[in-house]
Image (cartoon, coloured by chain):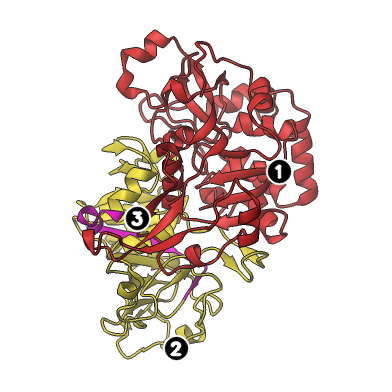
Chain colours: A yellow, B red
Amino acid sequence: MGEYTLREMMTIVAAREIRNGDIVFCGTGISMLAAMAAKNINAPESVIFFETGAIDSKLEEIPLAVADSRVMYLAATNGGLFDAFTTMQNPITGRHVIGILGAAQIDLYGNLNTTVIGNYIKPKNRFSGSGGGCDVASFVPRCIIFMQQEKKRFVNKLDYFTSPGHMNGSNGRKKAGLREGGPTVVITNMAVFRFDEITRQMYLAGCYPGITTQQILENMEFAVDVSRATEVAPPTAEELKILRNKCDPQRLIL
Amino acid sequence: MNMKQDKVMTLKDAVREYVKDGSHISIGGFTINRNPMAAVHEIIRQRINDLHLYAHSNGQGADELIGGGCVSRLDIAYGGNGKYAATCIRFRKAVQEGTIQIEDYSNFQMTLRFMAGAMGVPFLPTVSSLGTDLVNVWGFSKEERERDPKIPNQKMVVMDNPFGGWMDTPKVVLVPAIQTDVTILHVQKADKQGTGRIQGLTFADVEQGKSAKNLILTCEELVDTAVLRRNPDQNNIPFIHVDAVVPVSYGAYPTACYGYYDYDPAFLWRYARYAKDDNLYREYLRKFVHEVKDHEEFIALNGGRERLAKIKADPITGYAVNLDRG
């Protein structure tokens, strides 16, 4: 086993969640790289799909935005935002979609804030906003969420509730009128979290090699069940080779 | 719309004619692709202000309109520029400092809002955002909405499905239509009558164009009507919606135009440096917008032909292969 960076680890851990037949909704940066890694490593029959309207893009070079012309090249179809979001809202196609999202804040139930820190009208810190994030989180049955493991990000209460996770727990989505689903996994620079089938609360599913549960808990405002945690397998030499040489040879994301 | 046979105008005249102080406006494109940047700079140059801007994810164009002091109200889903600005910098500053008023939507909601405007209905339903702050938190107050006939009386409305549980859907969120005074799109090809052809992804440009009272097309190439009509299935902007056609080569620069040129990473990094500092940004506006005659001069100041050669699209892929984007 060679050296690898945390970013590489996060990318590969996310790629392993993607299966053949999945339609992968991805945003910019590491989420795009995870989708490309899955396609090249473990899920060659997954379909990469962008909110801007491109389906099954060739991606010979890594796009640096979801509107990058690189997503348009050799796509099956080039449509628009309406096509992309209705594909996800339509339950026939939507149930095959797996979303990849990131956020500034996340709570115990995987609800996300990508909008503001502080007051909405005059915030301390303004972020990009929902984009298609809230739509994806509302429509699709499975989501991978990338987070930095920091206390200010794993919070008891979101400053702004942008994208729905499991709302307030079991049946929360149903009560709100949302489609079944919600986040399946949260991948950070230290750990992997999943959500309890019954309570829909986040629990620690895995620690990265050399990281203790204590270190992880110190970097969260809320406590989670750690009894189910195992060690997460680091990327294999083969996974790293493909990720570095095939997915991001120019090191634009890694 | 207008039914003139020849709608070709200069950019200066088209902006002067159709973009007024206080106009409700939208621009085409998405983050770093096909924003009508020549038109954005002309709006800033003409010092048009108090605009109400509607944006799904108009990165560079929205950021410069805000930075240029043209915008006072903003309905937006996303203010980011991919790798070049996780959050658009002048947008972020303006919101944090309270110099613009903002209301947040999702990308699908903004798309539906344009589509409702294009369809001539007051709202469209979605199941997105139920239970979230997108629905619950308003940027414009009830009083302001009642005072201003140009904005709807509510942000969104949650409604029980009036068809019972039809389509397994208990509730929907209704999002209000947008009808802009003017929308500006940059397209690859257009003819003088206003038929437009967008190549590559259309984003929400077609819906935006059709939701507008006045539509300005800037285009890379002005082509003969006969040429466009040879493949009408490739034309996506019907001329009946269009008011002005403005040929502007590299009119989306520094954002990309599929099949013609890529975004300019070097410019976008330089822009980010200017945008982070108020004094530098004033300098940027003075040097690159206000004291510049037109888009050609703007491009000349940013490396001119030599730079354009670097970002020229490869005819097969539609982008600049192996462009240094780091």
Q: Which residue is mark 1?
A: B50
Residue type at mark 1: give it: Asp
Q: Is residue A232 magenta?
A: no
Q: Quadrant of residue B249?
A: top right
Which region shows up in magenta? A89-106
Q: Which residue is mark 2?
A: A223
- Marking on residue A202: none
**Residue B270 visible in the snapshot:** no
**What is the chain identity of the residue bearing mark 2?**
A
Q: Position of residue A23 (x, y in %)?
A: 26, 54
Q: Quadrant of residue A117?
A: bottom right
Q: Is residue A91 magenta?
A: yes
Q: Calculate the distance from the C-alpha at mark 3 to the C-alpha at mark 2.
A: 34 Å
**Left or right position of B147 against B247:** right
Q: Position of residue A185 (x, y in %)?
A: 33, 72
Q: Which residue is mark 3?
A: A243
